[in-house]
């Protein structure tokens, strides 16, 4: 099967040609399979946003290539345009991109650019709004009258409404309260089961990534440091700490417990931890 | 890209000119701009040019940067020179074709004009190269402070100028961010006719305006919280003080004025 997104030997420099030139990402090779959820983590400035801006051709690689659906996106104008619709990119703090008079029209901006018929646009807006959790009564309000979290949802719906094959979210939960975070993560999970789309999610939060991602990609200083299942990645907690990252609190506790000789599995979420404890007490009771 | 625009073209350095008091620099630059037009003979003009070159050397601003400031004006300089060649007449005529006349005075005027503009630009860009925008507006505020007598709010004006300069890079960054976000939703910014293109700007400018206003309110709150009430009774952390070097510079420029006047007096005026 052709991967949904593939980057080969990708390098991007900022301030090229000046003495301040830096490689924001350096010789990255990455394959994102169709239907999987990939989490990208890394310290601030590790190049996460730069990397994902290549997936739909917003940034042009200085070296290497980007393939969407097996096709080099810079092959022609048409492939570039197609990649914009195939890969839906939702930036950090997307609420600042809202501009239309009503939320409905803002969500319709993407499909309208795809030159879809009116009834199809309407259908997509309603589905996307439903999936992103935009309340029905908010659709006819001005986007500027919504709360921060509601704006965020509207902006994410604006990308979902293009029904991209790959949905890329840059820090979707940044700046939300714990409840908002949880809701957002659940929303992404539901979106994924409903559509079967590939999802790439960038985050600082190990907990969030652990609960949604099939695979985790760790960026460190412009390069891929680790790539694997959450289990594989989070078991290397010493290395992660050296990169300025932290494994989830609950994982830390369980790793310590294991070191102390208690027979517990590796867990990444509180739910898993609860289940593990139940098992443990059950096992203990039987003895 | 948009980010190539450089405004407030300060060149970091530690030269004599960088260390001078901004107010004195302002006054002297103004005086020099007047002197350029006092020059009537080739010798006084040459003195002016020598002084300018000297100032550039003292500032330690690379020649490349200086040339960069003249480059955009190249067409204008050429245009003025050509215009002057044919429009001023007098003295020996070298060449005549229909109504066009190439005369000695015409050529002289053209040379004078070109050199004057170049000197003007170089001197004023030296001011911006060696003074940070903040110091520049500070200096303007103090030099204009006598105007408060006429109830002009000089402090407010200067503060507005400082803030505007401060926020230009932020706005450029913001525009780029919003443009990317809309492009990701399939907005086409670079194609189509004039109307299509101006329509495509709406998704950029609405969010930009909204965030600018938000930022302005936030800034106003932040300033109020730190007890900002405008210029009245405000003192400064950094006092501007005239130092010996400022008087040396002033003396130097006065000597230049004397030189220009003497040379004008003893040599033939050519324009
Ligand atoms: N427009 C730009 N001009 C110059 N350098 C830039 C620019 N954008 C990013 N950089 C640099 O490139 C590097 C990677 O930036 P990037 O935004 O990809 O990081 P990030 O991993 O997304 O960080 P964060 O977690 O803070 O969002 C950083 O060191 C940054 O300073
Ligand atoms: Mg980022």
Image: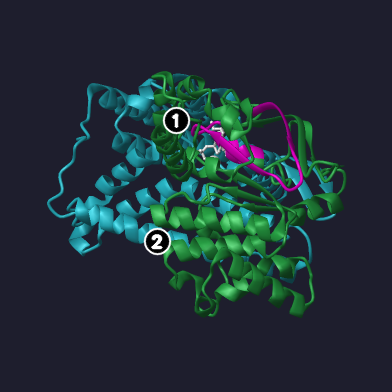
* Residue A154 sits in quarter: bottom right
- Name the subunit of mark 1: A
Circle 2 residues within 10 Å: few <14, some 14–19, many ≥20: few
Element type at marker 2?
helix
Observer-side mark, 1 or 2, equals 1
Q: How many marks?
A: 2
Name which residue lies at 51% across and 59% down.
Answer: A96
Q: Which residues are magenta?
A: A25-51
Circle 1 residues within 10 Å: few <14, some 14–19, many ≥20: many
What residue is shown with label 1?
A: A246
Magenta segment includes A40: yes
Q: Between residue A41 and residue A189, name the one nearer to us.
A: A189
Name which residue lies at 29% across and 31% down.
Answer: B21
Q: CA distance from mark 1 to mark 2?
A: 34 Å
Q: Between residue B194 and residue B271, name the one nearer to us.
A: B194
- Name the subunit of mark 2: B
Q: Is residue A63 left or right of residue A43?
A: right
Output the letter for the chain in green.
Answer: A
What residue is shown with label 2?
A: B214
State the residue lying farthest toward the front. A287
Q: Is residue A264 above or below residue A203?
A: above
Magenta segment includes A121: no
Quadrant of the rendered image holding ligand 1: top right
Output the letter for the chain in cyan.
Answer: B
State the residue lying farthest toward the left. B233
């Amino acid at each position: 099967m052709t991967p949904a997104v593939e980057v080969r030997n990708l390098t991007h420099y900022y301030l090229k040609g000046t003495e301040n030139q830096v490689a924001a990402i350096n010789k990255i090779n990455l394959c994102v399979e169709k239907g999987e959820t990939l989490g990208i983590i890394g310290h601030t400035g590790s190049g996460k946003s730069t990397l994902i801006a290549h997936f739909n051709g917003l940034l042009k690689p200085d070296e290497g290539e980007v393939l969407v659906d097996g096709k080099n996106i810079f092959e022609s104008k048409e492939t570039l345009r197609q990649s914009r619709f195939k890969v839906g990119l939702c930036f950090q703090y997307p609420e600042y991109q809202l501009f239309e008079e009503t939320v409905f029209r803002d969500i319709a901006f993407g499909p309208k650019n795809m030159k879809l018929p009116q009834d199809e646009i309407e259908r997509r807006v309603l589905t996307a709004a439903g999936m992103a959790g935009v309340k029905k009564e908010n659709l006819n309000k001005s986007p500027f009258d919504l709360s921060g979290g509601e704006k965020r949802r509207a902006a994410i719906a604006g990308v979902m409404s293009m029904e991209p094959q790959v949905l890329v979210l840059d820090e979707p939960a940044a700046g939300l309260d714990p409840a908002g975070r949880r809701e957002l993560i659940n929303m992404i999970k539901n979106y994924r089961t409903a559509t079967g789309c590939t999802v790439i999610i960038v985050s600082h939060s190990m907990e969030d990534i652990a609960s949604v991602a099939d695979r985790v990609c760790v960026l460190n200083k412009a390069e891929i440091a680790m790539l694997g299942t959450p289990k594989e990645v989070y078991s290397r907690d010493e290395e992660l700490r050296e990169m300025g990252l932290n494994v989830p609190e609950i994982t830390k506790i369980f790793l310590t417990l294991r070191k102390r000789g208690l027979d517990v599995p590796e867990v990444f979420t509180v739910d898993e931890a609860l289940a593990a404890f139940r098992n443990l007490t059950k096992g203990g009771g039987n003895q | 890209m948009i980010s190539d625009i450089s405004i407030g073209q300060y060149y970091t350095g530690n030269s004599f000119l960088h260390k001078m008091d901004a107010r004195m620099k302002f006054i002297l630059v103004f005086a020099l701009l007047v002197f350029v037009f006092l020059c009537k003979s080739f010798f006084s003009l040459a003195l002016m040019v020598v002084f300018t070159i000297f100032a550039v050397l003292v500032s330690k601003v690379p020649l490349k940067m200086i040339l960069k400031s003249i480059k955009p004006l190249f067409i204008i300089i050429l245009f003025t020179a050509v215009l002057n060649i044919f429009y001023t007449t007098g003295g020996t005529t070298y060449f005549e074709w229909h109504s066009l006349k190439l005369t000695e005075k015409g050529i002289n005027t053209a040379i004078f004009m070109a050199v004057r503009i170049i000197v003007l630009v170089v001197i004023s860009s030296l001011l911006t190269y060696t003074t940070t925008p903040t110091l520049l507006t500070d200096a303007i505020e103090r030099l204009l402070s006598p105007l408060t007598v006429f109830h002009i709010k000089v402090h407010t004006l200067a503060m507005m100028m400082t803030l505007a300069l401060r926020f230009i890079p932020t706005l450029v960054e913001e525009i780029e961010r919003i443009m990317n976000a809309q492009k990701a939703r399939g907005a086409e910014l670079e194609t189509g006719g004039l109307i299509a293109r101006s329509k495509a700007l709406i998704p950029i400018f609405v969010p930009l305006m909204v965030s600018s206003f938000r930022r302005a309110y936030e800034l106003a709150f932040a300033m109020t919280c730190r007890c900002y009430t405008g210029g009245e009774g405000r003192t400064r952390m950094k006092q501007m003080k005239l130092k010996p070097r400022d008087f040396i510079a002033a003396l130097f420029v006065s000597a230049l004025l004397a030189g220009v006047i003497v040379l004008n007096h003893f040599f033939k005026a050519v324009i």
